[in-house]
């Protein structure tokens, strides 16, 4: 449930945070005939397609009639995911996991936002529950694309996560290698 929950919470928070970038007080300003025209042109020019998509989704889930059904429920799931991490860290100091479920795709290879969102499935639980995590290089695919290893730690224990990442880098040389660019 973490993936679906994240894609309710993150756009809602992004929508709320980005609302201030209207070209009046903050951010880029594109001239217009009046305030509405200026804000419309500014947002069209200043935000890419993905940001616009997230703002629209976030505005929707925060709107009257949908807040409790989507955002409120997502916050409850976020709490459950956090409790799962707390329970796991009662038994271990660190969780090691792949960074993504698939090998990387080449730039421009995937245009479908849903397919791209699914690659976040392993990093989202840590992100939405506020536990520290880091991804370190751990190899390359047969076609030469980099692969990451994720280290996840207890709340407010960034030091352990960073020490583990540094120890891994000292024990391997993956972080010094670069993919062949063609």
Image (spheres, grey):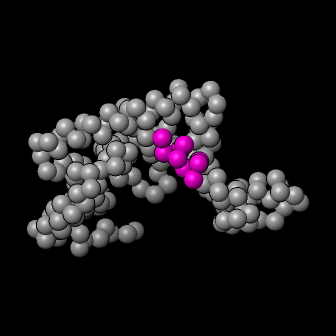
Give the magenta range: 9-17
Kindly give the residue lying farthest to the right in the view shown. Answer: 33
Please count the marks in the image: 0
Q: Quadrant of the N terminus?
A: top left
Which is more toward the observer, 129 or 37? 129
Which is more toward the observer, 54 or 48? 54
On whether residue 13 falls in the magenta region, the answer is yes
Q: Residue at x 87, y 58 (%)?
A: 34
Q: Residue at x 59, y 48 (%)?
A: 16
Measured as percent of width and height from the top left, residue 64 is found at 64, 31
- Please state if 59 lies on the left or on the right of 140 as rendered: right
The answer to whether residue 142 is visible is no
- Please state if 168 lies on the left or on the right of 60 as rendered: left
- Please state if 181 lies on the left or on the right of 142 as rendered: right
Measured as percent of width and height from the top left, residue 98 is found at 24, 49
Q: Residue at x 52, y 47 (%)?
A: 13
The answer to whether residue 11 is visible is yes
Kindly give the residue lying farthest to the bottom in the view shown. Answer: 176
| Quadrant position of residue 24 | bottom right
Kindly give the residue lying farthest to the front in the view shown. Answer: 156
Measured as percent of width and height from the top left, residue 111 is found at 52, 47
């Amino acid at each position: 449930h973490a993936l679906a929950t994240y894609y309710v919470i993150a756009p809602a928070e992004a929508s709320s945070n980005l609302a201030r970038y209207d070209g009046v007080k903050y951010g880029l300003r594109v001239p217009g005939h009046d305030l509405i025209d200026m804000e419309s042109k500014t947002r069209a020019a200043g935000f890419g397609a993905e940001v616009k998509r997230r703002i629209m989704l976030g505005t929707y889930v925060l709107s009257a009639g949908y807040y409790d059904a989507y955002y409120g429920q997502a916050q409850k799931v976020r709490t459950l995911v956090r409790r799962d991490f707390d329970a796991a860290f009662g038994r271990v100091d660190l969780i090691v996991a792949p960074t993504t479920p698939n090998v990387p795709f080449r730039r421009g290879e995937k245009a479908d936002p849903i397919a791209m969102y699914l690659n976040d499935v392993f990093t989202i639980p840590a992100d939405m529950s506020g536990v520290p995590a880091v991804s370190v290089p751990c190899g390359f695919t047969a076609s030469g694309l980099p692969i990451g290893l994720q280290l996840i730690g207890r709340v407010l224990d960034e030091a352990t996560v960073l020490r583990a990442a540094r120890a891994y880098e000292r024990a391997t040389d993956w972080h010094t290698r670069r993919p062949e660019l063609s």
